[in-house]
Amino acid sequence: MDRKEIYLMIVTIAGCGALGGVIAAHLIRGGVSVQAFQRKGRTLEVLKEKGITLLSENGKTAPACPFTAVSDDPGDLLPTGLILVLVKAYQTGSISPLKGLLSPEGIVLTVQNGLGNAEKLCSIFGEKRVAAGITTYGGIRLSPGVVREGLQGSITFGPWSGGKTNRYQRIERLLADAGLRVVQVSDPRPLLWKKLSMNVMANPVFALTRMSVGQVAKNPFALDLMKKVGREAVEAAARAGVIMDFQENWQFFMKNLDRAPDHKPSMLQDMEAGRKMEIESILGSVLSQASNEEDFPYTRSLYNLLSAIDRTRGHYQKNPD
């Protein structure tokens, strides 16, 4: 195996929080060489010392999964064939130092929340090297370097420039061979809008009520609000040229609520931890399709409430990227 082939087999996780930790652990257990690009802090220290520890949905602990390398400095990392972007949407620009690590045939894949991430990555790496998608895997960060699996799902992705090429099929095989469920599509944009509609319905309501998934699933007032913002997301998608069926989205949404009654969506985890929330990339993406200030009133109300909370905690600002 030559040096180029070795580099193509190294996966870099950019952002090893809840979801990043879950996916990293699955890949390492599947025999993939994984390195982590992680900002300074306690998580970085734990990942260097112990690797990532993944607890199953029933709380069973497995041995920690060691990384090939962990650093906040790209100079300490190896050239890579795949960068999986899992930082918060407002931090997408922070991975620009990884540009020099990506091999000539390499791919950058975002499965982040919200819209606009792929466009930011295209400005850094070039459109032909960027893929975008969604994942229904889920995770909860219990402590630095320790995550619990929330949902066992899948990754669906496609090239931002459209079509299917060998480089994307190679990535699909790599992920699948590691045991992840993965599907490739020719155009990821409809997927991103579908995921956005799910995030718009779920994340703000969970963050504001601090209810569990199981509690919300049985609460008619919460469900009514979710339906209203879900319909607004479908209308916003239509204005962007993506047609969705609300009833189909709602059935899919409720099915996933039933699957994970104890799961905590990401915005609720951020609320509880006092972190900045992904308000702009999720709710702001719907509001970007508004023709006036009267459009999308339910989404706008949630946006304002959550932004008010972030402001009191010193976080509020529009995405710096």
Image: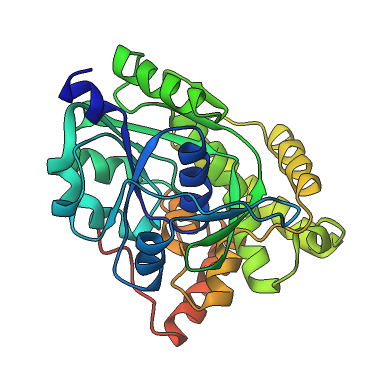
Which sits in the foreground, 259 or 59? 59
In the rendered image, residue 213, in percent from the top left (x then y), is placed at 75, 58
Q: In this view, does 47 lie above or below 11?
A: below
Asked whether, in this view, residue 100 is left or right of residue 280, the answer is left
In the rendered image, residue 148, in percent from the top left (x then y), is placed at 62, 56
Which sits in the foreground, 132 or 52? 52
Q: In which quarter of the image is the C terminus?
A: bottom left
In the rendered image, residue 242, in percent from the top left (x then y), is placed at 49, 30
Q: Which residue is painted at 29% across and 70% down in the image?
A: 40
Asked whether, in this view, residue 32 is left or right of residue 197, the answer is left
* Residue 286, visible in the rendered structure: no
Q: Quadrant of residue 43?
A: bottom left
Which sits in the foreground, 227 or 169? 169
Q: In this view, does 155 lie above or below 50?
A: above
* Residue 87, visible in the rendered structure: yes
Which sits in the foreground, 293 or 119? 119
Q: Which residue is painted at 19% across and 38% down in the image?
A: 79
Q: Which residue is painted at 55% across and 41% down in the image?
A: 195
In the rendered image, residue 149, in percent from the top left (x then y), is placed at 63, 51
Asked whether, in this view, residue 203 is left or right of residue 31, the answer is right
Q: Which residue is painted at 67% across and 64% down in the image?
A: 205
